[in-house]
Amino acid sequence: MSAIRGWCPSAWRPMLAGDGLLLRVRPPLARLTRAQALLVAELATAYGNGAIDLTRRAALQLRGFDEAGWRAAVDRLVSAGLVDPDPAIEAVALTVAPDWREGDDTHRVACALTARRGDLPPLPAKFGIAVDAGERSVLGDAPADLRVERGVDGGLILRADGRARGVRLGRGKEVDAIVALADWFAASEGATAGRMARHAAVLPAWASGGATPLVGELEGEQVTPRYGRVTGIELASLADKLEALRVTPKRSLLLERGAARVPAPPSSSNIPFWKERRHAEDLLEGCRGAGMSLTSPEATSLHQPGAGPPAVPGENRVRVSGAVQARPRSPLASAPHRARVDACVGAPACPQASVVTRALADLLAAAPLAGPIHVSGCTKGCARSAPAALTIVGRGGRYDLVRDGRADSPPFRRGLTAAALLAQLGAD
Ligand code: SF4
């Protein structure tokens, strides 16, 4: 194993970050059973530094591993059906609309594509495919290069990223079309551009259509951790009372509570049930042994929306503060977010960052500023790809300011210290 820098990490190709190796897990069909979620929580706590980041590709990034811990964790993730034993297959980034039900179009197409991942040609590391075929397409701007979506006429369409319209798909032909368009991308030297949206070649006639996607909002009971960050202990506490969790590209977790709503995705897991039970019991026992209550009022509030933190108006969500467990709640952690603020992990955890991001984002969130606000450690903009009213970008240990743009847009102020930035924005 060699640690990879500047590369899209996977379970088999961990990236070396400022806090150790970063291990990315993409749950099959975006779903974690209770036992799988407890296993992820256990591995993050036992081998990593306990931090888990939810990503905009609906993956879980476990942080702070050393090489021995990474190896042990991957072996158990493979046994639990959360990582494919073939690194080439695992590298195919498949994002699935998390609100699927067994037998619906998202479930059907995602299962068929999962089974045929080996038919895809070699693709750039960041190339991704989205299956978003519910009653409405809900993945929004989640990164993907090929998208199977619901069209406005009710049928399914295939749309190349960067194009407003796609081509209608025949039932049962969806995966053939995905593989054919991926083949075209590879053959037309799309790897030089890296992503479909940047690939200027004219699409083949069969893939050029006038069908537009029917867009909707993801519904269902969700937990949205602040900045997409949970700890292993928080994840265990949340998963313990649930049937399963779905990971969304909104960096939230969709909760499954009832067996009637819990379709079982196909799994290559051959882990005996009693062993999965054992993982869960070991973790819960370890938490109790460490004096951490899993049934504290704060933890319980996660399972009983309405008894916990207030729901965000207009959204069927519960915001989780940074202090679900017994550790002291900092004044910043409980500061009201008056604007929607996104922030990547920043320095020191990310080697690409030269500045701290989330502490600054906390201060901006508490200031009377119109959002959305995006604080990015560099121009890559991992936390948000859509434009924001205000984007703060780290560069050389200082901050640049972008108005109505993205992290890679031209700034209107450059090279500010944190103090100067706050003064400029009236947030000091
Ligand atoms: S945007 Fe943030 S997390 Fe992403 S590479 Fe840059 S500093 Fe790192």
Image (spheres, helix red, strand yellow):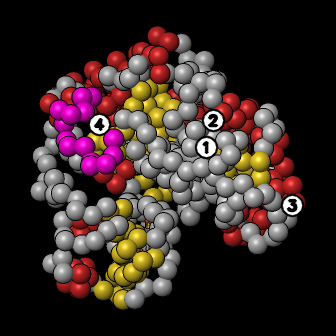
Task: Confirm whether residue 81 shows in the render.
Answer: yes
In the image, what residue type sits under mark 4? Answer: Glu
> How much space separates mark 1 and mark 2, taking CA atoms?
6 Å
Residue at image x 78%, y 65%?
Answer: 190
Determine which residue is flagged by label 3. Answer: 204
Q: Residues within 10 Å of mark 1 (few under 14, many from 20)?
A: many
> How much space separates mark 4 and mark 1, taking CA atoms?
29 Å
Magenta-drawn segment: 303-316
Pointer 1 or 2: first along the chain: 2
Dominant secondary structure of the residues highlighted in magenta in the image: loop
Q: Residues within 10 Å of mark 3 (few under 14, many from 20)?
A: few
Say left or right for 269 vs 302. Answer: right
Task: Confirm whether residue 84 shows in the render.
Answer: no
In the image, what residue type sits under mark 2? Answer: Thr
Q: Position of residue 99 (x, y in %)?
A: 51, 35
Q: Position of residue 291 (x, y in %)?
A: 16, 28
Residue at image x 58%, y 56%?
Answer: 143
Q: Nearer the viewer, residue 372 or 324?
A: 372
In the image, what residue type sits under mark 1? Answer: Asp
Q: Nearer the viewer, residue 34 or 217?
A: 217
Determine which residue is flagged by label 1. Answer: 132
Determine which residue is flagged by label 2. Answer: 106
Check residue 234 in the rendering and tell me which mark sits there, or answer none.
4
> How much space separates mark 3 and mark 2, taking CA atoms?
25 Å
Q: Position of residue 277 (x, y in %)?
A: 42, 15
> How much space separates mark 1 and mark 3, taking CA atoms?
22 Å
The reply to whether discs 3 and 2 touch (Cβ–Cβ < 8 Å) is: no
Pointer 3 or 4: first along the chain: 3
Q: Element type at marker 3?
A: loop
Q: Residues within 10 Å of mark 2 (few under 14, many from 20)?
A: many
Say left or right for 363 vs 241. Answer: left
